[in-house]
Image (spheres, coloured by chain):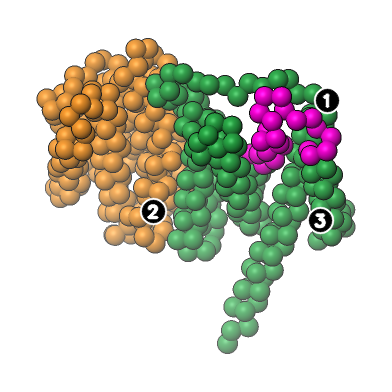
Chain colours: A orange, B green
Amino acid sequence: MTAYLADVAALARKDLKLELRARDTLPAMLLFVLSTLVVFHFALPADAGEDAAYGLLWVALVFTALLGLARAWVAEREAGALDGLVLAPSDRSAIWLGKSLATLAFLVAAELVALPAFVVFFAPLDASALVGVVLASIGICAVGSLVSAMAAAARGREVLLPLLFLPLAIPLVVGGVGASISPDPGTYLVFLGLYDAVFAILSWAAFEYVVTE
Amino acid sequence: MSITKPSLTVLAWGAAALTTLAAVMIFALAPEDADQGFSQKIFYVHVPIALTAYACFGLGAWKAYRLLATRGERYDLESYTGVHLGTIFGVLTLVTGAIWAKASWGVWWTWSSNQLVLFLVLFLFYCAYFMLRFSVEPGARRERISAVYALFGVALIPVSFFAIRLANDFIHPTVFTREGPQMTGEMFAAFCVSWASITLLAYVMYRVELAGKRIDANLRDLREALQP
């Protein structure tokens, strides 16, 4: 167990270190989410109200996550490092968990900028909305890391990833928007937690089949 | 083809006969719905098609699971065929559902019909399955990636269904129900025969498509083997 966690930590640390040196994902995500929010200001009619803004916040978060996920396996693909990782004497699901954690770190960093910006530009966020963001981010990264590993094996992976990911993300958007605007957010938070549990277990169990030749 | 299975020709004729019987029962035997009138007849087609689509997706996922569990290569085509037929029946569900919505509510599309929205989500999901399948090089890797994605589909069905019901709470506070009068015995009989006929039809289509795909694959293998 400790060996497994050490593998996961080493893999996640590798991704974070790469990002610190090359900086080719996080700045893009930050800029993207900010410019999306600005575009939304002009896309929303003046009397659209706060509820519409909350909906668009979730669109912005999902697409920002997609931007990060599209680059998630690029380093492994380009240098052929994935074959090495698969051959390494550790459980393959550790690769998925490490990648999910690293992607989650990027997404949370982007949200640390996006959410204050949203509050300044549009509308306040309450505690249940923040919990919803955290739970949905976990789900996005768990499913997204697996799906982007699938897309990485295909031709035209940049085009394919959103097609694979968005239908799976619809329940997350429902839960997130519900947690932000519903007077009774508890149901939506429980739903998000359930989604995370179901799809994290599925992805964890299925990852091995996606990467082995 | 193994001897124990009934031959495809017999099954195909059986499906044709059963479909005719179902049509006769729907239009001649089952009484007209007191509330919706003639347009309610599409219920006998729409609901069995939707149930068959679920069954096909389930079959595709089951074969995908068998592929991952046993590494049996033959399950790949079986899983693909199941998903393919499920998508065809899913599109038919969307079309018949839209016709029914137009007839009884006056609109082609309503976001408050959970079943229709679910089928739209599933349609998007399974179209992505085909995109994925056709953009990965054929081989063991593709078989496994497709299988994992097909398995995700059956997890997505209940999760999406629940999500869509939750979404209706904040998108449509007033949900109008499709509650009609109780089904009479004749109506229920017509529904069951129609369901059986469409399930049998789907099975025949499954066998035909699978046989075609197998021949295709064998031919490709032969051609590769004969290449100098």
Q: Do labels 3 and 2 share a chain?
A: no
Q: Which SS does the magenta portion mostly show?
A: helix
| Among the 4 quarters of the image, the one containing residue A182 | top left
Which amino acid, by three-letter code, is at mark 3?
Answer: Ala
Q: Which chain carries label 3?
A: B
| SS of the residue under disc 2 | helix
Please identify, in this view, whether the residue under mark 3 or under mark 2 is nearer the observer.
3
Residue A111 visible, this angle: yes
Residue B113 falls inside the magenta stretch = no
Answer left or right for A170 relative to B183: left
**x then y, percent, for residue B135:** 45, 61
Residue located 71% across and 24% down the image:
B34
Please identify, in this view, whether the residue under mark 2 or under mark 1 is nearer the observer.
1
| Among the 4 quarters of the image, the one containing residue A64 | top left
Residue where numbered disc 2 is placed = A160
Task: Looking at the picture, tell me which residue is in the foreground, A152 or B18.
Answer: B18
Q: Which chain carries label 2?
A: A
Residue where numbered disc 1 is placed = B185
Residue located 46% across and 32% down the image:
B111
Answer left or right for B13 relative to B217: right
Q: Which of marks 3 and 1 is nearer the N terminus?
A: 3
Is residue A135 depicted above or below B208 in this figure?
Answer: above
Which amino acid, by three-letter code, is at mark 2?
Answer: Leu
